[in-house]
Image (cartoon, coloured by chain):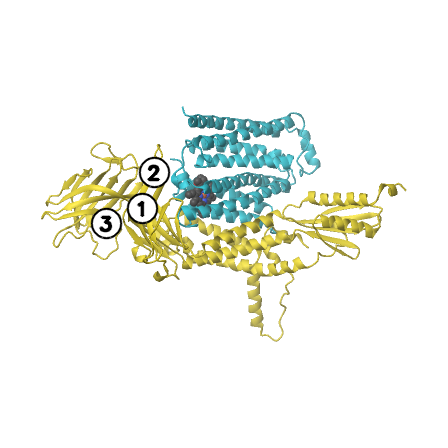
Amino acid sequence: MSDAANLAGLADTLFTLTILAYSLATIAFAAELAFASSAQRKVLVATEGSEFPQARTGFSARAGMVAIGITLLGWVLHGTILLLRGLAAQRIPLGNMFELATAVTFVGVAGFLYLVIRTPRLRGIGLFVTLPVSVGMVLTGLFLYAESGPLVAALRSGWLVVHVTTVSIGFGAFLTSGIVSGLFLVRSRFEEAGGSSAEVSSRVAHRLPNAETLDRAAHRLVVFGFPVFTFAVIAGAVWAESAWGRFWGWDPKETWAFIAWIVYAAYLHARATAGWKGSAAAWINVGGLVVMLFNLLYVNLVSSGLHSYAGIN
Amino acid sequence: MTTRSAAPYLALDDAEEGEPRPASQPGRPPWRARVVRGARGWWRWLTSMPTALMLLFLLALAAVPGSLLPQRPLSQTAVAQYFADNPRLAPVLDRFGLFDVFAAPWFAAIYLLLFLSLIGCLVPRTLGHVRSLRAAPPRAPSRLSRLPRHADLSTDLGAEQALDVAEEELRVARYRVLRKDGAISAEKGLFKETGNIVFHLALLALLISLAVGKLWGYEGSVLVQEGQGFCNTFQQYDTYSAGPLIDGADLSPLCVDLEDFQARYEPDLTPASFTGDITYNRTLGGPDEQATIGINSPLRVDGTRLYLTGRGFAPIFSVRLPDGTELTDLSAPFLPTDSGTMLSEGVLKLPDLGAGRDQLAVEGVFLPTAADVGGGLLTSVDPRPLDPAVAIVVYAGSVGLDSGIPQNVFTLDQGRIGRGQLERVGAANLRPGDSLDLPDGTSITFTGFKEFAALQVSRDPSQLAVLISALAMLAGLLTTLLVRRRRVFVRPGDRVLEIGGLAQGGSAEPAEFARVVTGIRTALAAAWPTDRREH
Ligand code: HEM
């Protein structure tokens, strides 16, 4: 076996290990939430359900710390997958949908870890990051897998690095932001119900960070992701000018990039507009993520356009 | 100051603040007042933030059918296919312009409204901002304890001295400071609004440049075989599209010859590069210049760009008529239907075989590396022309080139076969040198192939303006998202210094206020030496 094949094989093994790590983290995060003691409920009631219990005691707190540790480990493995695939193919590991999806989840987890460093109580959302990321990676592995290999001629350009790296970074930030906004919607309903709603979701909601913290975290990630994504689209247009003969041609991928851009611009506007901030803005953010995912999956796999080389065979 | 203007973008609904509402206007007929009021109301609605948001969403929504339905500018054939598959629905959709969404009047209506909305809010907003850049910060409010951030620092310094210390500290922290009536107002981060306005102005500039490009731009494409060439005139293009304000005389006099075309592949048959060596003249009779163009590397000549957008094979045939006449070097481009194996389809139409003679059409597939899949059926297994072959069906009759109805050069009108205007007279798989003899004594020989390249010439006079606008948007966006606008007020009390703070922006930043307070506290302590404190 050649070196390249060895590296690519190792990357595949790491892919499995990464999923395993995130799954374990998911279990540990779930344990943290499940064993948050009923004493904390009292704390919560005392503060009218508005504050996330800082002092998770005993088993619950330990589970949470373990979960973060495993997530971090998984994230390092996750990055190594990309590194090895890059080395195996001697190019930036962003040449097909498998690699792109892997990079997006990598950035998404990075966004989560960053939030936890800035605001430790956001650890409480860990379950809702590692679970979708694990599931997403399993699906990526099953349906989008592509062997590490050389790039088609159209992709042999310095702009690949600029365009696709920034796309992945922006997309990854949007991914985590969309999740956080979804949790905001759950949490703010719970808070509006006085923190005592009997719904099933409230059992989860009362353990989430408070709505304001979630709202701010989601906003922070979009404030980061939006300019990056804007730049990615501009870079795509510059590349398209030399690759496809025009900088913009309403190719399906371009059209959905345009739609996503508008939705995120609307999110930022909405968050600053009376009557729209809060839930309406959060819904827009969730909608933005749906558009991004649609652009990745539907446009690559179902419709056909100039971006289709990036699909799976 | 209100937190309403704290938007990271323009808070459009702030634009009219302070504008006098027209009361009843004396001396005017009431209907005029009503019209004026109606127009003002409408304008206020149009330039309000929720309206701008709705228009943004509408624009996004309007783009959706443009990606889900086939679009004429992208693929005429896909649209034709859609009409064939949905004969009842398609004409209805067509009436609403849904097969060319981005040129539809209703799409234009949405972005024009958005455009107006933008202008309507930008103008007063820009003027207001210029004013506030020059104006001093507003006076300190009377009760600082009412502000979102608030701190009391005890000090033994006198009021003026304490204010001196605070002022110095705020100036070092790059605040603009106004000291008036025994209090300090300080302000920072006005560039947030500058960035905001730059972003929106750049967006306007972008929209305008796009429109200019659409009006004065053009694009033409042509298939050129090795050894052939073309000049930049609309007549020579297979297809072209041009803005309404450009006419043929405006095209730059570029002429191009394709000398050689090469395709390179990796061992696993991934396409590695396609390049064409060309000779071109910028002007009529100008000197020949050489260049190599390829994927990702067009030729740019004085704002006109030449691209290699595709490639394919053109099989070559020769025909010997029953009377012995030889026609050689007859070829037509066959279009690849599978870029992996370059299996290509096409038709060679031969309308002029002599008076009284049937026209011929050679329809078929070209296989660069042919492999028999059994039963005489050929397929291609490699995109490189290692073992070329054609599988052809020959028709005789009238191909219809003279009927006046425009025809697709790559396909045969199947209706003519159905109506018996064309009759199948032979079929064969041929390798180079092989011939097919027709019943009437005509013989068709497959002699080889040429490669052709799809070339495209484009010009968009506003392309650079679009790029600059886009980059300006990005710069404005970064500024407005990164800069935070804050105000700090300081008022001395009885042995205390009262500090109040306001931050504009989505997430108020307590840390920054705390930094300022800590700075002032340290400075106060430093200004009140310990030896005196011990009294
Ligand atoms: C105006 C032009 C362009 C726009 C708006 C654009 C937009 C996007 C977007 C939104 C993605 C996100 C990934 C996804 O959701 O699938 C993407 C990915 C990608 N783009 Fe572009 N792009 C443009 C031009 C180009 C050009 C010219 C190339 C190469 C010739 C290119 C190559 C890629 C690749 C390789 C990916 C990652 C794989 C994928 O397609 O999913 N893009 N682009």
- A38 and A181: which one is in front? A181
Residue A113 picture location, percent across and down: 59, 34
Return the mark for residue B413: 3
Q: Is residue B132 above or below residue B77?
A: below
A130 vs B323, left or right, is right
Quadrant in which the N terminus of chain B is drawn? bottom right
From the rendered image, report the letter of the chain displayed in yellow.
B
What hue does chain A carry in this figure? cyan
Q: CA distance from mark 1 to mark 2?
A: 14 Å
In which quadrant is the C terminus of chain B drawn? top right
Work out whether mark 3 precedes mark 2 in sequence or the reverse, and give the earlier one: 2
| Front disc: 1 or 3 | 1
Q: Residue at x 68, y 49 (%)?
A: B503
Visible in this render: residue A271?
A: no
> How many neighbours does mark 3 have within 10 angstroms: few (below 14), some (14-19), or many (20 or more)?
some
According to the picture, the residue beneath numbered tag 2 turns out to be: B264
Q: CA distance from mark 1 to mark 3?
A: 25 Å
Which comes sooner in the sequence, label 1 or label 2? 2
Per the image, the residue denoted by label 1 is: B453
Q: Nearer the viewer, mark 3 or mark 2?
A: 2
